[in-house]
Image: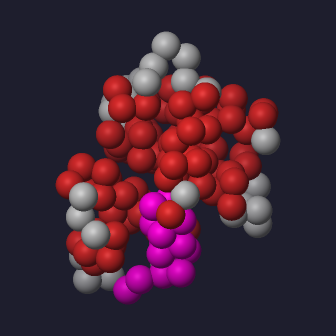
Amino acid sequence: MKRRLAREKALQALFQIDLSDIESEDAMIHALDGAESDAFFENLVHGVVTNQTEIDRLISKHLVNWKLDRIANVDRVILRTAVYELLYQEDIPANVTINEAIELAKSFGDDKSAKFINGVLSSIHSEL
C-alpha cells in the first residue's frame, strides 16, 4: 500500500474512532474494506490513538481563536495524523507530511480546510 493510500485509510479509521468510540482494530478493519493492511497504516492509527493527549495539547497550543473540539472532525483527524508524523516519523521530511495533510484536506475537508491545516501545521513545525 502506498503511503498516500495508507494515510487516507488511517484518516478513515481515526475519523470513526473520533466519532463513535469504536475500538481501533474494528475501525481499521472497516477502513481497509477488504484491502490488505500495511505497517505504515497500522503505525499511524495506533500512534495517533496512543499519543492523542500529547498531540492534542500541541495542536491546541497553535490554534488561534479556535478550540480543538470546535474544529471540523475531519480537520481535527488530519491535524492529529500529521502532528503524529511530525513528532514520531523522523524518516519522513516535515514538508512531505505537511503537503500530504494539505492534500487530504483538499480531498476530505471543506474549501477552507487546506489553508487552515497548512497554517496550524506550519506553526507547529516552526516550534519543533
Residue lying at the far top of the rendered structure: 65
- Residue drawn at (43%, 31%) of the image: 68
Q: Quadrant of residue 122?
A: top right
Q: Residue 26, percent across and down?
A: 26, 75
Q: Residue 60, percent across and down?
A: 54, 31
Q: Residue 72, percent across and down?
A: 33, 33
- Residue drawn at (28%, 69%) of the image: 23
Q: Which residues are magenta?
A: 36-49
Residue 70 to residue 36: above or below: above
Residue 49 to residue 53: above or below: below
In the visual, does 120 lie left or right of 114?
right
Q: Does residue 115 appear anywhere in the picture?
A: no
In the visual, does 85 lie left or right of 23?
right
Residue 10 to residue 122: above or below: below
Decide whether the magenta segment is chiefly helix, strand or loop: helix
Q: Quadrant of residue 11?
A: bottom left
In the visual, does 73 lie left or right of 103?
left
How many callouts does the rendering have? 0
- Residue drawn at (76%, 62%) of the image: 90
Q: Does residue 69 appear anywhere in the picture?
A: yes
- Is residue 37 on the magenta stretch? yes
Q: What is the quadrant of the C terminus in the image?
A: top right
Q: Residue 64, percent across and down?
A: 55, 17
- Residue drawn at (48%, 69%) of the image: 46
Identify which residue, 36 or 64, lies in the foreground.
64
Identify which residue, 122 or 23, lies in the foreground.
23
- Is residue 18 on the magenta stretch? no
